[in-house]
Amino acid sequence: MADQQLIVVGSSHKVAPLRLLESLAFTSQEVAAILPDLQQAYALPEVLLLSTCNRTEIYAMSTDVNADVVVLSEWLIQRSQARTQLDPQHIYDFKGDAALDHLMRVICGLDSMMLGETEIAGQVQQALDIAREMNTGRNHLVQTFSAAFRTSKRARNETAINAGTTSVASAAVHLARRVFSDLGRRRVLIVGAGETGSLVARHFTAHAPGALVVANRTRSRAEALAREVGGSVVSFGKWAEVLPTIDIAVCATQSPVPLITKSLVAEAVRPGGARPLLLVDISLPHNIETSVMDVENVYLHDINDLTRIVEKNLSKRAKEIPNVEKIISEEKKNLLSQQATQKVGPFIKDLRRHFEDVRQKEVDRFISKFDEQDRPLAERLTRDLVNKLLHDPMVEIRTLGNQSQANQDRLAWARRLFGLDRISESGDRND
């Protein structure tokens, strides 16, 4: 059987604009339908398709890596042409050890748009689940991806590659928790239900605030977000009515003029009151007047503050890259050693069986010259002797798992040396 190698053919945010990547985005249902056809069309032993908003990659086991890389690259380009034009320059490929290295970097978040993000591990798991369900991902891919998941888990547990907030939306919640350590009793107002405002609302929801109120120019959009996060709605421009009850207000709109003014805040915050009000302005241009900081017990942070938090955390994550790469190197070595052992497994099995047959026949032949009660001692003595004689050959044989032609020649020579080919030809116990 021809040797199989892992290959990766794909496109990501690193080589193609997101508008082009959209043409290669597949739903889970589309992936499930594509995989069997892809496997059959190109006679791939195993194949998996990973599709996210930032990357689409085909992972496959191949017996002809150069040819399969070419045809899979062409397949990706053809699939994209129905919606937009993807060029060969937007496609990359990796083979063998480089493909394994790429997979592990992807799943650890080193290849992500946001360094160290953890969502990719779940997306890879979903891709593997679909491949297994469609029977296009079996022994080799399952073993390889299991090693990748193990690597990702070690990276998360043993390094700080995913520590700290790395999005403006999550940074807003991070700031809120600095002021209010417990958000469980805090009331939150989100002004703006666009993409950023929605992300902020979802991040707050994860910390179960006491209440979450949404305001948006289009009320239906505010209502949809409120239903999603279990919040309530206030009419746009009417937040002055609820502001006296609010602990945290986040403004994320595109208004050309400030929406939350000093006078509005001054009316909402009772002079001498002990309860602080945290205002977070994620809008550009700013939608909260900076003069609100003149009001007692009011704290204001804008997008520049949030960006500094994100950049600081990304800098910390970047320093962890060498530590993650060390883990990747260790896990790659473990996997390749395991695969090498599996490749020479049949040889080792035949060799051990051959020596056991010889040992057993010699014990049977000579045991009659001793007392039967000596058989256990003879068994143990001869078994220990065989194990010692086989130790060094076994160590050397395991190093030949790499399916290079030179190693294959050495394995063939070793089979002849120990007479295993003669056993095979005579049909003597060689499954």
Image (cartoon, grey):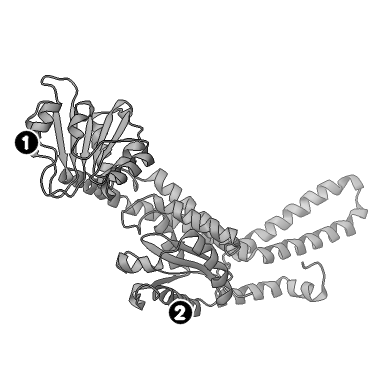
Q: Label 2: which residue?
A: 70
Identify which amino acid the numbered label 1 is placed on: Ser
- Residue appearing at x 46%, y 56% in the figure: 124
Height in image: 299 above or below 138?
A: above
Q: Horizontal and vertical percent for residue 301? A: 16, 39
Of labels 2 and 1, earlier in sequence is: 2
Q: Is residue 228 left or right of residue 411?
A: left
Label 2 or label 1, whichever lies nearer to me, is 1
- Residue appearing at x 30%, y 27% in the figure: 182
Q: Is residue 6 left or right of residue 24?
A: right
The one nearer the camera, 54 or 196, is: 196
Q: Which mark is residue 291?
A: 1
- Residue appearing at x 37%, y 54% in the figure: 109
How packed is label 2: few (under 14 Cα within 10 Å), some, or many (20 or more)? few
Q: Horizontal and vertical percent for residue 285? A: 12, 49
Looking at the rendered image, the quarter that the N terminus falls into is bottom right
- Residue appearing at x 31%, y 57% in the figure: 113
The one nearer the camera, 78 or 98, is: 78
How packed is label 1: few (under 14 Cα within 10 Å), some, or many (20 or more)? few
The number of numbered badges drawn on the structure is 2
Q: Is residue 78 left or right of residue 322?
A: right
Q: Horizontal and vertical percent for residue 295? A: 9, 28
Q: Horizontal and vertical percent for residue 430? A: 77, 68
Q: CA distance from mark 2 to mark 1?
A: 61 Å
Labels 2 and 1 touching (C-beta < 8 A)? no
Identify which amino acid the numbered label 2 is placed on: Val
Q: Does dot 1 land on a helix, a strand or a loop?
A: helix
The one nearer the camera, 347 or 140, is: 140
Q: Is residue 294 left or right of residue 209?
A: left
Height in image: 165 above or below 354?
A: above
